[in-house]
Image (tube, grey):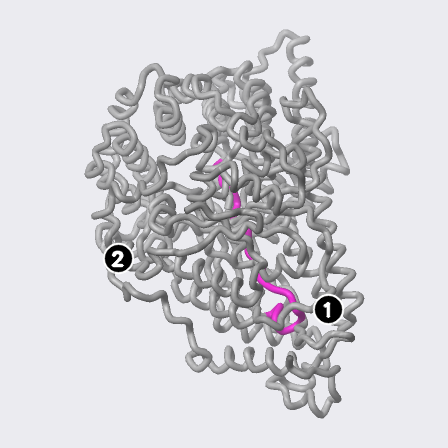
Amino acid sequence: TMTTRKPKSKTVQKQSNFDASKRNDKDAAISRVSEVVAEVSTPITSTPSMTVSLLITWIVPVLIIAIVARFGVDTEPPAVNIPPKSRPIEFDMSGTKPSQKPSRKPTKTDTNKMMMGMTKKRNPTSSPSPLKASTHPTSYQMILDEIESRKRMWKPEDDDTPSREAMSTPTSPTKTRSNGKPEPSKKSPMTSNSKQSKDEDRDKLQEMVERSRKEYKADPTNVFNAIRLADALRQKDLRYHDGGMGQKEATEAYHHAIQLTLKRKEALLAKGKPTNLSESGTQNVPNEMFLDYPQKSTDGMLCALYTNLGKLYFMANMFEMAVEAYTQCIEIENLYLDAVGSRGSSLIILGQYAEAARDLQRVIDNDNEHLFNDAFTGMAKVLVAKEEAAPKGWEPMVEILQKLIDSYEATFQGGGLSQKQVVRAEALNRLHHVMFMYHDAKTKNQEAAWNHLTDSYKYKMSTVEPYDANHESQKLVSTKAVFHKNFWSDGIGSQNNLPIFIIGFVRSGSTLLERVLDAHPRIVGTGEDSVFNGQLDHIRNSIVQASLSGDMLELNQVVREMAESVANGMRERWEKIDANSADNETERKQPLRFTDKMLTNYFNVGFIHMLFPRALILHVARNPMDVLWSAYKHEFPPGGLDYTSEFNSLASMYHSYREVIRHWDSVLPGRITHIRYEDLVNDMPSVASAIIAATGLEWDSSVLDFHNKKQAVNTLSTTQVRKGIYKHGMNAWKKYEKHLKPLAELVGDEVEWDLKTTLPSYAQTS
């Protein structure tokens, strides 16, 4: 163990790479570090989605945190993107003009040429070589030297482990399209004289929330004040996956706005006046979806409010409540297609396929302008899961799809794309992907399926910024450099073992694992809206303030307080969902464990271990080619996971994942519990029993009936999990083996993984 000591005199401090005057001023030192790190960092933010994205704002936080304390990696959580199909209130963005640029920056390369990059070969026998310190710019090397020098300057009391100081750094911006989809972030300079967040869009959205909240409190009788606050909170929830921190307030604001609007409707009816008359004098509620609230009729306002409330419930995993809210709108206007299609999506999650098919078919039949292409995707999911639930079957929809594809492709131009062409490319991406699902599941024509899949991704990648492989490499190198064996100090962290963290590569079987856990009467699965990740900014900032003093007792107290805040947030979220669940005939006992399924937390294990050293971390791993094929063929919400649709970037992401798992097993041996997906599927009773034993709870036989639970599952695995033990995905990649050969070559030796399930009480079957 390295010998350490308390901070030395100013004479020693002057030997640092930073100017001594700035060293004495903590704020200036932080600012200088930020400036230097900014020279070599390219933050990337993924939004929205499910779930969750792998390309995250990471390297800047981890380097700065390594300098000022012993704390680790911040992962910008992926937002679940449910694009609002009705036009929300336009907020004043502090005088800024709306961008006229395409939301996801188009590449200048022709779309056909872009797909050629999928077959470029890399060394098939090894993963990307990590960057050596000597290859970094001088300023980056100075940061690494400073980390080492500060490690030697501070010896905490009763601890012989090197320590670090921590400080927060803001996240990078995430821009959104007018329809709610995210735009990849761009570089944002960090100046040395400002600690202000680089994420200007997020700051402005927060300012909007605060301004709307102030106006609402000043005059709660103004319906538009309530709507502005509710919509601002919902938009924040859509863009930034923050664990639903504002959902309760937004729900209350929507309900208040609805009550005010209902009173307005009652007054109009009492006077014998129509309630469906818009400001322009029209009486067509379905066509009001894209009007601002002040221009809508009273019925149009109610439909918009009920629909947005339903989407908020959807984000909060309150799917029964979402269906109820959408139904309130549909009872006013049965062709309000935004509500009809959204209700169909919720019904799929609830396993009510016949009802979902009726709603989705209504959208397809009445969407004359083809504004709701999600209905095709939803209907395809129903047909794959339970074809008899959709009386019309595949053929009528396929006929429509082919006509739309032919029409759109006839007017599509490659190269630099206008906003109109971006929208057209996104539509072609979606339509071709549904055709892939049709041939993959129905006709079993692999050649036709593959052609549609590659066409789908050709259009998709034409609207996405090129993958930043250097960022992925830097992120990996920084993680390994900062989190070494001597990083963690004994006694720091909460003894709370309430959270169960689930990590792994996308499409690895994490949803099945979470459902097994959730089937236990004392464990609750909270889905992919991670409370932990939602509080990371606050956690980091609080730790910063405590760590700057160098007082280990204060630091430990803050860490434990932050851990308790996460645990309390999980409890509060469960109480809210449970209270609004339709399945509340019998009172459920207070949960003793909550799952936190943010897969990209495999880069954040060091930070998790610091806060929750006793919490269970379950890593679910799947056959490499199976998981890569599953990740490649599935459409994720727009964001960082767009890059799973291209071979080079997918292989790079997978290499990083494998390398960081190896790193944690090296520096924290035994801390991660590995579970092979194949063991879980093939030996469910034994593995499930061992999983529950690892949680410290008693076995309950209901765990094996996980697929019969009414608990809804909002992931891409929704329909699969409801089938119980689903073995059809095993070796599914072999159907497309010849097409996936270039991907296998890029992955190299890592197409094999001799990983064992490490559950303590599990005996591996032969």
Magenta residues span 64-83
Callout 1: SS:
helix
Q: How many marks?
A: 2
Q: Position of residue 607 (x, y in %)?
A: 62, 60
Question: In the depicted view, which residue is nearer to us: 589 or 570?
Answer: 589
Image quadrant where one finds the N terminus: bottom right
| Residue 372 makes an appearance in the image | no
Residue furthest to the bottom in view is 11
| Disc nearer the start of the sequence (1/2) | 2
Q: Nearer the viewer, residue 465 or 600?
A: 600
Q: Residue at x 40, y 28 (%)?
A: 378
The residues tagged by marks 1 and 2 sit, at their Cα atoms, a distance apart of: 46 Å
The amino acid marked with disc number 2 is Gly
Instruction: Give the image location of residue 7, x and y in percent.
Output: 74, 83
Q: Residue at x 23, y 56 (%)?
A: 119
Using the rendered view, name the quadrant where residue 655 is placed. bottom left
Residue picked out by circle 2: 117
Task: Tell me if 598 is positioned left or right of 464 in this view.
Answer: right
Question: Looking at the picture, does residue 390 appear above or below residue 603?
Answer: above
Q: Please, what is the three-letter code of the amino acid marked with disc 1? A: Ser
